[in-house]
Amino acid sequence: MTYTINFHTKWADFDANKHMRHTAYNDYAAEARLRFLKENGFGIAIMEQHNVGPILFSENTIFHKEIKLGEDISLKLYLEASSKQGERFKIRHLIFKENGDLAATISVYLAWIDLSKRKLTVPPKQILETLKHIDKTEDFEEIILRKK
């Protein structure tokens, strides 16, 4: 399924040019990821039980059209890449204006960290099940991890 979420923007999201400030796009993308995980059985409480959390390696934003002051948005999430055990993965966010025009594309590269050891870890099998609930991009690829 394509995970879609709608957001009402807020005054603080906009800048003096009356368009959405660049970091607000990324804030909405992060919120959409966490809501997706929670709605599909892997919310903050489960992360705490397993002592893991997501960690961001990179975030790339491409702006297509400006979002103007007071305009609401929708986001769609897609799985862009994943390792076999789900320890590393990439999510692509498409952010749309109220009229349906694509406003931005955000790609993030993530991993899971053991919150006690502060080291990368393989997440519980439950995360693999959660990631199955998101559509893959047409150019989906498997992330091959190098053995140490």
Image (cartoon, grey):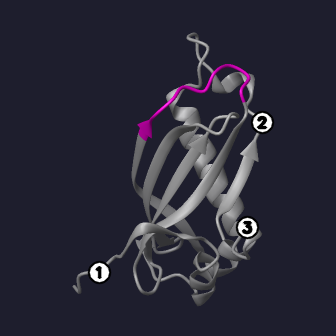
Query: Which of 99 and 9 lies nearest the eye of the viewer?
Result: 99
**Picture coordinates of residue 77, whole percent (x, y):** 58, 59
**Picture coordinates of residue 132, whole percent (x, y):** 60, 80
The amino acid type of the residue labelled 1 equals Ile
Q: Is residue 44 visible?
A: no
Mark 2 is surrounded, within 10 Å at the Cα level, by few (under 14), some (14 to 19) or many (20 or more) other residues, namely few
**Picture coordinates of residue 93, whole percent (x, y):** 53, 52
Q: Which image quarter holds the C terminus?
A: bottom left
The residue most toward the top is: 16
Q: Distance from label 3 to label 1 (Cα)?
A: 27 Å
Q: Which residue is mark 2?
A: 8
Which structural element holds mark 2?
Answer: loop
The amino acid type of the residue labelled 2 equals His
Segment tinted magenta in the rendering:
62-71
Q: From the viewer's perspective, is 144 left or right of 50?
A: left
The amino acid type of the residue labelled 3 equals Lys
Q: Which image quarter holds the N terminus?
A: bottom right
What main secondary structure does the magenta stretch of the protein show? loop
Q: Which residue is mark 3?
A: 38
**Picture coordinates of residue 116, whole percent (x, y):** 53, 73
Total number of numbered labels?
3
Q: Which residue is mark 1?
A: 144
Which structural element holds mark 3?
Answer: helix
Mark 3 is surrounded, within 10 Å at the Cα level, by few (under 14), some (14 to 19) or many (20 or more) other residues, namely some
